[in-house]
Amino acid sequence: MLFDLRSRGRRRTVQGVYLFLAILLGGGLVLFGVGAGNGLGGLLNAFNGGGSTSGQKAVVSAQEEQAIKQTQATPSDPAAWANLLQARWTSAGQGANFNSSTGQFTKSGLNELNLATQAWQKYLTLEKNPDPNLAIVAARAYAGQQNYAGEASAWDIETSADPTAVKGFECLAVSAYAAGQTRKGDLASAKALSMVPKAQQALLKNQLNSAKTQPSVAQEC
């Protein structure tokens, strides 16, 4: 049987399966959290209204532990740091790290977010063409810490890689406004508005402008 763990080889196989499933789950959440549609919303909403079981927490912990070992074994491999970013982002939303009743990260969750963005920064030093999906993960990790300048920089990378998705420019605009980067916010806002039907522009403009006085809007991406 596959899950008879007395054999070292089988234990490694099970660990690999768990790691793959956890990464697949994290990647799926990212892809479903962002699209070319209008309106502000995002992956953080996926955490609301539900808790995580101890079993789920154990899988995420195994994923994170495996990712850490990977960075230690191959510290110059950007893929290793990408896996660590995703593992820590996923861990931040699990168990005691996230309060599903309030929709807020706990102290331990914020620590996971900080470690996630550290992994992102290391990844950027090794990868000349960053994955835009990883940029989205990093942006949301920064948003969870209310580090809006970091969030804006990540959305900047995402929009450069995928200039056809209005969602990215919306999020770049509101995070730049929240960070006090008005010119960057205005440019991203103008780009986003040019990409939606004229009938939707007034509503979208109001949503984007609200970030100038309400930084928390940037957390909705």
Image (tube, rainbow, N blue to C red):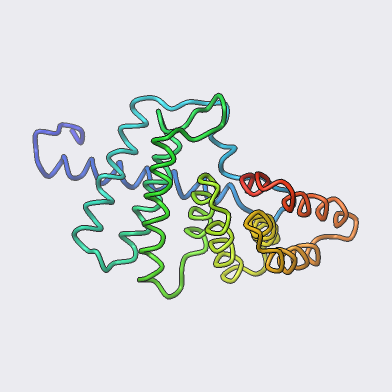
Q: What's the residue at 49%, 53% (across, down)?
A: 137
- The total of numbered circles placed on residues is 0
Residue furthest to the right in view is 199
Q: Is residue 75 above or below residue 52?
A: below
Q: Residue furthest left?
A: 7
Left or right, 56 with reference to 201: left
Residue 54 vs 167, above or below: the answer is above
Q: Quadrant of the N terminus?
A: top left
- Tell me: residue 159, above or below residue 170: below
Image position, residue 196 (x, y; %): 80, 60
Task: Write the residue at 48% across / 55% down.
Answer: 138
Q: Residue at x 56, y 59 (%)?
A: 149
- Give x and y (percent) for residue 120: 41, 59
Q: Nearer the viewer, residue 151 or 34?
A: 151
Outermost bottom residue: 128
Q: Nearer the viewer, residue 9 or 92?
A: 92
- Give coordinates of residue 82: x percent, y percent: 37, 58
- Taking the image as shown, residue 160 lies to the left or right of residue 16, namely right
Q: Does residue 172 appear left or right of residue 161 in this picture?
A: right
